[in-house]
Amino acid sequence: MLHAAKREITAVYVRYGILGSTLVSGAPVGPRQVRTVLAVLLSQANQPVSTEVLAGELWPGAAPGSSDAVLQGRVSTLRKLLCPDLPARSPRQLIRTRQGSYTLILDEGELDAAEFGRLVQAGQRAAAQGDLAEAARNLREGLRLWRGPALQDTGRGPVLTAYAGVLEQQKLAALERRFEVDIALGQLSEAIGGLTEQLSQDPTQENFAALLIEALVAAGRGAAAREVFDNTRAALERVGLAPGPRLYQAREQLQPEQPAPVLARPATCPAEVPAQLPDFTGRGELLEQIRAALTGRGPRLVVLSGPGGVGKSTLAVRSAHLLRREFPGGQVVADLTSEPGQPSEVLRRFLLSIGVAEDAIPHGFVERQQLWRSRTADARVLVLLDDARDEAQVRALLPAGADCGVLVTSRRRMLGLAGAKTIAVEAFDQDESWELLAGIVGAQRIAAEPGPARRLVELCAGLPLAVRIVGAKLAARPHETVEELAVRIGAGRGRLAELRAGDLDVRATIEVSYAECTEGTRRALRLLGAVRLPAVSRSALACLLDAPEETGADVAEALVEAQLLQVRGRDELGQLRYQLHDLIAEFAAEKAREEEPAGVLGAALERMLDCYLAAGGRDGGRHNAASWCAAEADNVFAVTRAALERGWWERGWRLADSFAEVAKVRPGSASARNVTVLALRAARRCGDLRAEAISLRRLGELQWQQVKVASAVRYLGAAAQRFRGLDDGAELARTLVVEADVLAETGRVEQARDRLNTALEAAKQADDQRVHAAALDQLGGLYSDAGDFAEAQRCFVEALQLAREAGDLRGIVAIRKRLADVLRRAGHLDQAAELLTEALAGARETGDAHWEAHVLRSLGEVQRYFGDTGPARSSLARSLELFTQHGHRHAAAYSLRSLADLQAQVREYEQAGESLERCRTIFETLGDRRGQAYTLRSLGGLCVRTGRWVQAERSLRAALTIFDDLSMRWFSQDAARALTQTRNWSSAS
């Protein structure tokens, strides 16, 4: 069917060029995204290419929401270019659509890259048959198709990057074959000219250098050939590579020269460093640090420290090769795990390596050490000590010369090694892991499955050894897809069981460090693996071990020293935090299951539950509640999840709910929602209807804080229904207060008032002063919006008294802030400022950064009305900063809108306009109509200040419409007055 279809369309002939800029029938193609789509389709011609692959090439990071429409538009442009008179679904169309993919139909001879390949193959066949003239003709004809770098004007996602790389490699191979044929034909001048040009572009191309040497020798230019060899070797060494056999074979054609005089060196010059890995990846900054330390002034002693499998030895070998010329006395190497265990034997071998005769080596350790120091005192020798166990092992082998260098790798930091520069070797990032995997397996194979390849890299958790193992498996199994290996590693037996290939074994590498620890340290690692705290503090580790905090600190540092625990940094409370590497955590969990009784693991988890329950209750009312919440959120989630996995539903719910209560001080945090979802699950599993209703209400509050109205109403309605069924008046009242806030903000003021009246009655009957105060506070807000400031003030004053009696510190701050807003609108600025100063002190005393930000916004408004623009700017900027830090984008937009009003007031009109535009975008995205109306009102004022009367009227009319819809009478009146004044000023002007 495909051949028949192709015969139908042979009348539509096109010629595609990608060996340089993109051409169709000799004409350039634009724009860039169209060229990119065409190039991807050409790279997989006559095969379906999914829209996901195409999107990955157009947007290598993350595709925009409009990506499907944009892609369809680009394909449509291509179709019009290739088949201008054919509809998209014509059977003669060159680009076919089917099941989320596109196929470009291509005939022989239509693509320059395919023609290039055909001609090169013809040239190679002719050369093999001895027809060198025909070979040269085909190779030249093929190479003439190149007009520049392949795909030079397209985008470069994974597919095109790999494809361009393959084409460039094919070009280099064709050039090399052409030069070989030229030399064989005796066309030496042409070959020498072409090879010289290639080497000028990249002096490390060994094969071209070898051919140039051969051509120069054949032309009788031996000195020039020798210079080419020397220059190429120097260029290779500059990038850390050694000349290969091809270059040395070419050098053998040179006539020997009289050796130049050289500096005296030892009788023998050892070069014991193992061969470099051809796929060495990254580490450029570390290589520079090692070079600086081993060639600079002071002790030339470097310790590369890091966990097993992180690539310390590979890095050391690479460094040693790069530094070979810095140490003309040679390089000696000892693998301190596989060498004979006594340093005396290592010294014997070192002495033999630097030219000491066997019968001249003394038998005693001290005598050998003295001889080693004597022989190295004036030498420049590099000593590489791999996998050292401790400082004593290293000290015994140190050379005496100040110009000698010592490079040590160890799982420990060697803190007792005087003068040593310790360089931490850390895990790869995602890009480095990808690069290493591509280097082992081949970029094209990885680029063909970018999603599974990324997943595979993630499963390796940045450990180079793990990446090397999965790369080796893929390379050895060309029949297996990347996705199949990723699925197998991510499921079933677990990662550690799969991360093994030959003598490469991640588990065995971690086991070495584990075995060297004391039993107390190993036990701590097992318990950490069982509970899996993402960011453990010293106090949490002490709780886990049921030990004093000093013990927790000692054990944490012992695990860090053994490279089994990483220092994460300090949290918001100033405490040190540690974390397990993913693969070490999996190892620790395995050891916990194998070596710890179930009762011990259960007791450890119970201690963590009790610890966090106590901490949540203690810190929830203290000044550092927000900081504690931020620092412990991930740990609380982990402990709650572990409890639920054991079926501890009631205790898991208590911990989750206690955290959710504290997390009110950080309403923008995702962690609060995640923990509350676990709480709801726990409540339902243990059949506790009241707990379920509380969790539903908390989820409703969280949804409302993100202005997700529909889901907030759904959760709150479900919670209210359950509380009615339970006859729980106090909790029903709490729920109705939140629901009233949602209704009021969305313009359903009468429904909100009904909810609040019901909440007030329920709170009075339950004698709950806190919720009574909250209901009055919310009711005061409704009166304030309506412009009934006297009634609003009455509600706020009564609410404030109730909150004081209940000891509700957070409620006191909120009510003072709202009362101050009413006083400001009523013109009582002094009273408002006094109240806000008290509220700010209260918020800071309780550590409630959320309400501190709210109060600062109101204080900034009062300061602005007073004309104190400097303090106003500070208050508003700090409010914006706090909301942003806590991820509360919604509230941050309100602070930004107030800041824009200040900017307009001080005639920073351009900045004010930009701020308001950002506000409008945020409020429209969130669907917050109140915020939109405030922004439009401010925009109208800005336009008045700048004399843009038409825009001012338009903005104020739009604001008035929304205020009317939301029944915000005072704000409607304010917008109407402003609109009338604007019209009057506009007419007068």
Image (cartoon, grey):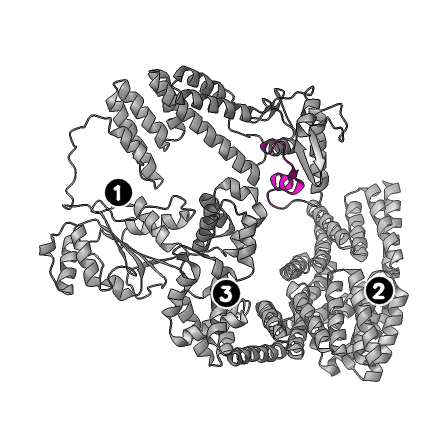
Q: Secondary structure at mark 3?
A: helix
Relative horizontal placement of residue 196, taking residue 547 as reference (left or right): left
Relative horizontal placement of residue 418, taking residue 171 as reference (left or right): left
Q: Residues within 10 Å of mark 1 (few under 14, many from 20)?
A: few
> On screen, 817 above or below 498?
below
**Camera-nearest label, 1 or 3:** 3
Look at the numbered discs 2 and 3 and tell me whether their residues touch, using CB distance below 8 Å: no
**Camera-nearest label, 2 or 1:** 1
Q: Which residue is mark 2?
A: 743
Q: Which residue is mark 3?
A: 586
166 vs 616, nearest the viewer: 166
Q: Residues within 10 Å of mark 3 (few under 14, many from 20)?
A: many
Among all residues in the image, which is located at the extreme left? 359
Q: Secondary structure at mark 1?
A: helix
Relative horizontal placement of residue 530, taking residue 197 as reference (left or right): right
Does label 2 or label 3 sit earlier along the sequence?
3
Identified by mark 3, the residue type is Glu
Does label 1 or label 3 sit earlier along the sequence?
1
**Camera-nearest label, 2 or 3:** 3
Q: Which residues are magenta?
A: 43-61
Alpha carbons under labels 1 and 3: distance apart: 43 Å
Identified by mark 1, the residue type is Arg
Q: Residues within 10 Å of mark 2 (few under 14, many from 20)?
A: many
Alpha carbons under labels 2 and 1: distance apart: 77 Å
Q: Which residue is mark 1?
A: 325
416 vs 887, nearest the viewer: 416
Identified by mark 2, the residue type is Leu
